[in-house]
Image (cartoon, rainbow, N blue to C red):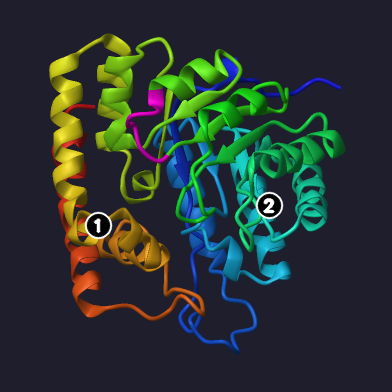
């Protein structure tokens, strides 16, 4: 079998959706917490506003807190709504390989373009375990393209350059959601060659492009849920080589995101990842992500205010950059 989507096709803005929740979705006794009407509206909005691909069920997509029926119906709703207009990489991560493979088969049968996969996180996984896990999924689903979710906090460690080199030999793996363009970025790029597209966060995309212009083909973001305009202007600036404009958008994004990371600490953000993201999305008024599902439905008031501030600042950027489209 051959992949229906390859690394050579990865480009542009890859937006991760939240899983919208109905009022009361923060209760343990809520039978079905998913707001399917908002799911349809948001998926359509993203496609109509020129997103390049949609990802589901990452961390703030609350993969870990959805029941099995909710997870299934939500992904069915997204895939049916998008209807092939853009690629959909759906999240299937569980605490073990067998359930992940079972979910992955379901998603591909639903019509997903490919899979968005973190790794089991009960134990920290060493290099052989990481490579073995992704190899097993690839063996079970040889025609399923995979985007790796590399989050050093969620999965108890960053994927090393040596591990990336081994993952690059698995044909299914076409891209990686990458957390920070830092000291190992160039080594990781060298390790994967042309087999895996390493996708930085939107506010790092400009710097990744400066360091490796031929490799920085795509970015991941959650901000497209709140309005695509700043991201589209950034994408156009990078594609046309407009460094001044790309830097301007990047600085605006970084300033807007400042209070998303309490005390500038990514570890502290990770303790409240779902809450921070959903509060800031709801604050924009552009999407109704709803409440956070248990057990991640408790939040510090000072951090909540920081997230709300991010939402208010981002919607101002949407208004600013909409005039440039």
Quarter of the view holding residue 309: bottom left
Q: Please state the horizontal and vertical placement of residue 179, each as a whole percent of the image.
A: 40, 41
Identify which residue is drawn at 73% across, 22% down: 171
Q: Secondary structure at mark 2?
A: loop
Residue 319 x, y percent position in the rendering: 17, 43
Judging depth in this view, the residue of 86 and 208 nearest the camera is: 208
Direction from residue 317 to residue 155 in the image, left or right: right
Residue 131, magenta (yes or no):
no
User: As drawn, is 11 to the left or to the right of 287?
Assistant: right
Exactly how many numbered labels are in the figure? Answer: 2
Q: Return the residue at label 1.
A: 260
First to last magenta residue range: 179-185
Mark 2 — residue? 92
Q: Is residue 288 visible?
A: no
The relative height of residue 4 versus residue 16 in the rendered view (above or below) is: above
Measuring 61% from the left and 17% from the top, which residue is drawn there? 195
Disc ID at residue 123: none
Say which residue appears at 25% left-offset and 64% top-offset: 283
Residue 86 visible, this angle = yes
76 lies left or right of 25: right
User: In x, y percent, where is residue 262?
Assistant: 22, 62
State the image quarter where residue 30 is shown. bottom right
Say whether disc 2 or disc 1 marks the residue closer to the N-terminus.
2
Q: Main secondary structure of the magenta part?
A: loop
- Decide which of 181, 320 is in the foreground and name it: 181
The C terminus lies in which quarter of the figure? top left
Q: Quadrant of residue 145?
A: top right
């Amino acid at each position: 079998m051959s992949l229906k989507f390859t690394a050579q096709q990865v480009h542009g803005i890859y937006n991760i959706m939240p899983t919208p929740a109905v009022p009361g979705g923060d209760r343990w006794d809520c039978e079905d917490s998913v707001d399917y009407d908002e799911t349809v509206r948001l998926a359509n909005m993203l496609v109509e506003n020129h997103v390049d691909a949609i990802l589901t069920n990452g961390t703030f997509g609350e993969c870990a807190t959805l029941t099995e029926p909710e997870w299934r119906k939500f992904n069915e709703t997204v895939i049916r709504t998008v209807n092939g207009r853009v690629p959909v990489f759906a999240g299937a991560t569980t605490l073990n390989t067998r359930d992940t493979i079972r979910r992955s088969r379901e998603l591909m049968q639903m019509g997903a373009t490919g899979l968005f996969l973190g790794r089991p996180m009960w134990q920290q996984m060493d290099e052989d375990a990481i490579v073995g896990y992704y190899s097993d999924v690839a063996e079970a689903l040889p025609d399923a393209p995979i985007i790796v979710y590399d989050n050093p906090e969620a999965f108890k460690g960053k994927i090393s350059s040596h591990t990336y080199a081994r993952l690059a030999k698995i044909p299914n793996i076409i891209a990686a959601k990458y957390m920070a363009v830092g000291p190992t970025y160039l080594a990781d790029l060298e390790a994967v060659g042309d087999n895996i597209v390493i996708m930085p966060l939107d506010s790092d995309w400009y710097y990744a492009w400066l360091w490796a212009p031929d490799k920085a083909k795509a970015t991941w973001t959650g901000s497209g849920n709140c309005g695509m305009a700043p991201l589209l202007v950034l994408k156009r600036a990078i594609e046309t080589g407009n460094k001044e404009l790309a830097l301007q958008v990047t600085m605006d994004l970084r300033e807007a995101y400042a209070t998303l990371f309490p005390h500038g600490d990514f570890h502290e953000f990770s303790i409240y990842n779902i809450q921070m993201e959903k509060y800031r999305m709801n604050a924009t008024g552009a999407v109704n992500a709803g409440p956070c599902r248990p057990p991640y439905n408790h939040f510090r008031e000072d951090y909540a205010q920081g997230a709300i501030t991010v939402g208010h600042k981002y919607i101002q950027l949407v208004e600013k950059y909409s005039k440039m489209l």
